[in-house]
Amino acid sequence: MELADIRFQGGRVTSIGEKKKRCGKNGIVICISGLAGTGKSTVARMIAKKYGLRYYSGGDALKELAREEKYDPTDRGWWESQAGLSFLGLREKDHKFDRLVDEKLLGYEKQGNVLLDSWTMPWLAKDGFKIWLLASLDKRAERVAKRDRITKQQALQMLKEKEEKTRAIYKKLYGFDLGEDFKPFDLVLDTDDLGPEEVFSTLCKVIDNVLIN
């Protein structure tokens, strides 16, 4: 895939001033976001390892809080499970869980040299090169079904319920529309027809050009 195949948001991304903004005061800051089944977390960990960045996941931080509420979020695809949706119900009633995680991630952003795997940081973080991985609902459900060993129909139902409730939480908390508002993003990449290695390779080309060189 050539760089010309990538859809950029917001015009040019390679001026020196923009590089400084995206790097942050204390080093590189990269935010990677995308709905379940886009390959977000897999690729985010690969990027963090390649560039020697500390990796922090908003989802992992929420799972730690779920453990404090006596959940066991160790199963594959826990967020789409009934237990995961139950914890999501707690988050709907009490936004302290999301606020705690976001405060923690914003602290990591200030430290720099970090990759933030998060649904909220692209809107909340002042600095950072912000990437959205895009994929159709059909493709995402197909991937989640394979990952979690469930039917595609089950995956579709769980994804729709999870994402509807999560959107409502973030809309109420911060006013943005998850999965619909792309204004914060420097780069939007459609992963429908790409595997993790292809997404990784493409993002590395962009990062090398925009942040490193």
Image: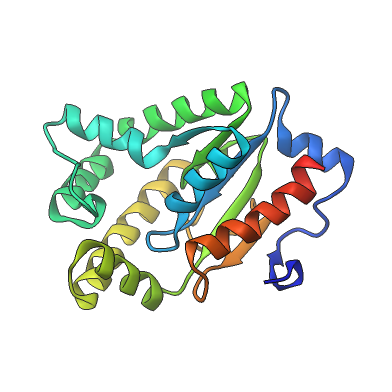
The reply, left or right, for residue 142 in relation to residue 110 is left
Q: Residue at (86%, 39%) from the top-left corner? A: 17
| Residue 167 x %, y % | 39, 55
Rendering quarter of residue 198: bottom right
Q: Quadrant of the N terminus?
A: bottom right
Q: Residue at (55%, 39%) from the top-left corner? A: 48
Q: Residue at (33%, 61%) from the top-left corner? A: 164
The reply, left or right, for residue 82 in relation to residue 109 is left
Image height of 77 relative to 94, above or below = below
Between residue 213 and residue 72, name the one nearer to us: 213
Image height of 60 relative to 38, above or below = above
Determine if residue 149 is in view.
Answer: yes
Image height of 41 relative to 187, above or below = above
Determine if residue 183 is in view.
Answer: no
| Residue 26 x %, y % | 70, 22
The reply, left or right, for residue 78 in relation to residue 185 is left
The reply, left or right, for residue 23 in relation to residue 53 is right
Image height of 12 relative to 7, above or below = above
| Residue 199 x %, y % | 56, 62
